[in-house]
Image (cartoon, rainbow, N blue to C red):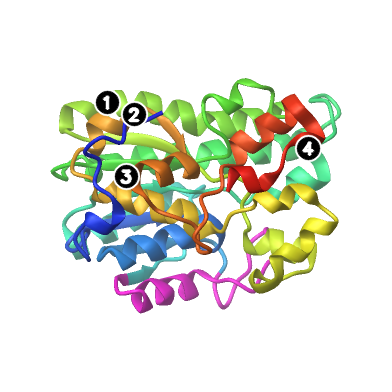
Amino acid sequence: MENTNDVPSRDSLPVRPLAGRIVLVAGATRGAGRALAVELGRAGATVYVTGRTTRKRMSEVGRASETIEETGELVTAAGGVGIAVPTDHLDEGQVRALFRRIEEEQGQLDVLVNDLWGGERLTAESIFGKKSWETPLADGLRMLELGVRSHVITAALGLPLLVRSVAPLLVEVTDGTAVTNRRYRENLYYDLAKNAPIRMAFGLGEELAEYGGAAVCVTPGFLRSEQMLTHFGVAEENWRDVIAVEPAFAIAESPQYLARGVAALAADPRRAERWNRKSTSSAELARVYGVTDVDGSRPDAWAYFEAVGERGDSVSADDYR
């Protein structure tokens, strides 16, 4: 765990510690990506947000209820400057155009958040509960495109601009830390997709070090995303109703929890020495920087699930909030 000695707390940071910083959150239509964009904007950054679902077009995710334009507006409403750029990050031409636009409009890029995904439909329909050879190959390969290839394209085309920053920061977002993902993640394709960002942060951190930069991989715990709430038929206001049918949901966290931790990390002047090449969780960032979830708690889902695996029914989620 990160040593918290002389680590700046969220309360000790300037009100707008990222003022003047230019940020790209790739994959910001909903979930953690949207929350990350909003919190980075709240800290004062100009935030470019990308995604495939717009007010005119819906992506394969199949949700028209959240759009990338709406995310941009939420960033601005939070106090930043939100700029929505509809982008398919599997299309090299679109990604090149995106970074060209950022360079022309801002002349710099200080933080790149790689939160590209969109494979939930595949996990539910084709992946979990199946051996690798039972998984439809097209679905498995699509998962690798969404969770790996998109990240690689974005990093490869964005890093030449990012490294011009005084202290460039690359944030990879995945599911699980290097420690928790030592276990098999239920299906080969999912395992590869969710371990790749961890290795990307590890390797790209090596390359960014000479520029005074850092690459870190972050993960939420049991994310209470819009899609998850819809799945259970509840809203944020009554999410605890789910616990009666799914006890593990008691440890669920809002997307803002991870976002607050990442915003504090981005504002930390010593972030490179503290975090470069590492993977971390929303819970660890909360402990280090003193942030909380929207209800004032500090859920640690990964520790909770590890304890459940060891002790079973004797574990209470209240002990991990």
Distance, label 1 to label 3, CA atoms, is: 14 Å
Residue 168: x and y in percent read 23, 42
Looking at the rendered structure, the secondary structure element under dot 1 is: helix
Q: Is residue 299 left or right of residue 24?
A: right
Dot 3, crowdedness within 10 Å: few (<14), some or many (≥20)? Answer: many
The residue singled out by tag 2 in the image is 204
The residue singled out by tag 1 in the image is 207
Distance, label 4 to label 1, CA atoms, is: 34 Å
In the rendered view, tell whether residue 223 sits above or below residue 308.
Answer: below
| Residue drawn at (43%, 74%) of the image | 74
Asked whether the residues under the numbered discs 3 and 2 touch, taking CB atoms below 8 Å apart as contact, a structural biologist would say: no
Q: What segment carries the magenta color? A: 54-81
Q: Can you name the residue that lies furthest to the top here?
A: 182
Residue 46: x and y in percent read 27, 65
In the rendered view, tell whether residue 243 sits above or below residue 278.
Answer: below
| 69 inside magenta stretch | yes
- Res. 54 image quadrant: bottom right
Q: Earlier in the sequence, mark 4 or mark 2?
A: 4
The amino acid type of the residue labelled 3 equals Gly
The residue singled out by tag 3 in the image is 158
In the rendered view, tell whether residue 106 sits above or below residue 3.
Answer: below
In this view, the residue in front, 181 or 139, is 181
| Residue drawn at (81%, 41%) of the image | 126
Distance, label 1 to label 2, CA atoms, is: 5 Å
Distance, label 3 to label 2, CA atoms, is: 12 Å
